[in-house]
Amino acid sequence: MIEQLRNIAVFSSLSEESLRELSNCMECIQYPKGTTIIRADKVEPYFYVLQSGIARAYSDGENQQITFWFGQSGDVLFSFNSYINNRPGYENIELLANSALIRIKLTDLFLLYQQNLEIANWGRKIAEQELIATERRLIDRAFKGAAERYRDFTAQSPELIKKVALKHIASYLGVTQVTLSRIRAAH
Amino acid sequence: MIEQLRNIAVFSSLSEESLRELSNCMECIQYPKGTTIIRADKVEPYFYVLQSGIARAYSDGENQQITFWFGQSGDVLFSFNSYINNRPGYENIELLANSALIRIKLTDLFLLYQQNLEIANWGRKIAEQELIATERRLIDRAFKGAAERYRDFTAQSPELIKKVALKHIASYLGVTQVTLSRIRAAH
DNA sequence: CGCAACATTTTACAAATGTTAAAAAATGAA
DNA sequence: TTCATTTTTTAACATTTGTAAAATGTTGCG
């Protein structure tokens, strides 16, 4: 188990001992494509790491559904508002492929944060990495047009382009599906 | 000093002892309106807390300057990329009013993160709060029109509307100044 | 296969926002 | 105050993006 975890980037910096403590709270689970693992308006009690598969987070609006995150192998996956504020979140997360996940109960994880300095700093770095990625997206929206964001996305996530419906990619990029089609047509 | 810190929300959760350790690394400084305290393309060696005053973070584009953050009393203020990755950042931060700040050298802060469990968790929560605020803005851009974002901004930050140039607020909201004027004209 | 369900593209038109330039208003310094 | 500078608004027009609906393409199942 512990050797297997070493191959997952998010765990690679942890010492043998911390990794063992963390692994005591872990479960491996597998879900089929189409499973919704996190629902808006519920407090989600687990923190997940996606070992294999694809996930997307979205929120429902009046007449639209906005995708604002995609996850791939190695990515961490959690309801921000459940994890941070212990409140129901605004995101649904569904699996777009059969997926293998590791999950950790938040109550266990928070206990570790209060007991283990290395794990507390590990949790800090997870939040920091998510933060810098999110802010980068906000700034990219200001400086780059939709066509450039689409090119960047295809360059950085070629597997997602193949496997994810374009309507989801369109809302992730902040445009309608019609606009994305126009971008793609302009080869 | 320590009593003074207790009144600043970001420090309020810390124990007497941790607060003393942290305060050993602190300096109070004052800068006049107009000072640029953090520059893009420099590694910024300090973490700041704004005791009083107003700050804005912006990035320079080809022919535009995009404001993506405002800070007020009690807000933390740091170059994300310096703090998280020890690399030059993409943001400039300038003061829009005479301001009093507390600063902590990052090298000292990182040492504390490796020594003090409570401070490590304090740093984790700071990143988490910034994360959830940033993600909320990204989602708001998808679900709300520019007029609604402007109304929300005026409701949540009435002091900023009074004191910050509208051109900065326009770019913060993701529209041109002309569009913001039109929104305001439609009372 | 052949159909049904769903995804993607295309078209025509509407609405929102951007661009540029100029006018009006506000600000700050002498 | 007065002048110069900067900010904000307004106007006219161009461009982008959105909306709705139809056409085309794709997928999976009986």
Image (spheres, coloured by chain):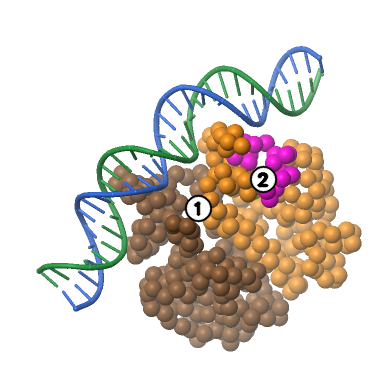
Chain colours: A brown, B orange, C green, D blue
Nearest-to-viewer mark from 2 and 1:
2
Mark 1: secondary structure: helix
The residue located at (73%, 67%) in the rendering is B122
Within-10-Å neighbours for mark 1: few <14, some 14–19, many 20+? many
Would residue A154 appear left or right of A141 to someone viewing this image? left
Q: Is residue A30 above or below residue A133?
A: below
> Is residue A12 shown to the viewer in this render?
no
Total numbered labels: 2
Start and end of the magenta stretch?
B154-170
Q: Is residue B50 magenta?
A: no
- The answer to whether residue B82 is visible is yes
- Residue pictured at 74% horizontal, 44% vertical: B159
Q: Identity of the amino acid at label 2?
A: Thr
Under mark 1, the amino acid is Ala
Q: Nearer the viewer, residue A74 or A111?
A: A111
> Label 2 lies in what chain?
B
At x 88% / y 62%, what residue is drawn?
B2
Q: Which mark is residue A96?
A: none
Tell me residue B182's x, y (percent).
Answer: 56, 34
Please identify the dominant SS of the magenta region.
helix
Residue A83: x, y in percent?
61, 71
Proximity of marks 2 and 1: CB atoms separated by less than 8 Å: no
Chain to which mark 1 belongs: B
Q: Position of residue A183 (x, y in %)?
A: 35, 46
Q: Is residue A57 left or right of residue B88?
A: left
- Residue that mark 1 sits on: B142
Disc sitting over residue B154 in the figure: 2
The answer for how far apart the CA atoms under marks 2 and 1 are is 19 Å
Q: Residue at x 58, y 54 (%)?
A: B137
Q: Residues within 10 Å of mark 2 (few under 14, many from 20)?
A: some
Q: Nearer the viewer, residue B13 or A158?
A: B13
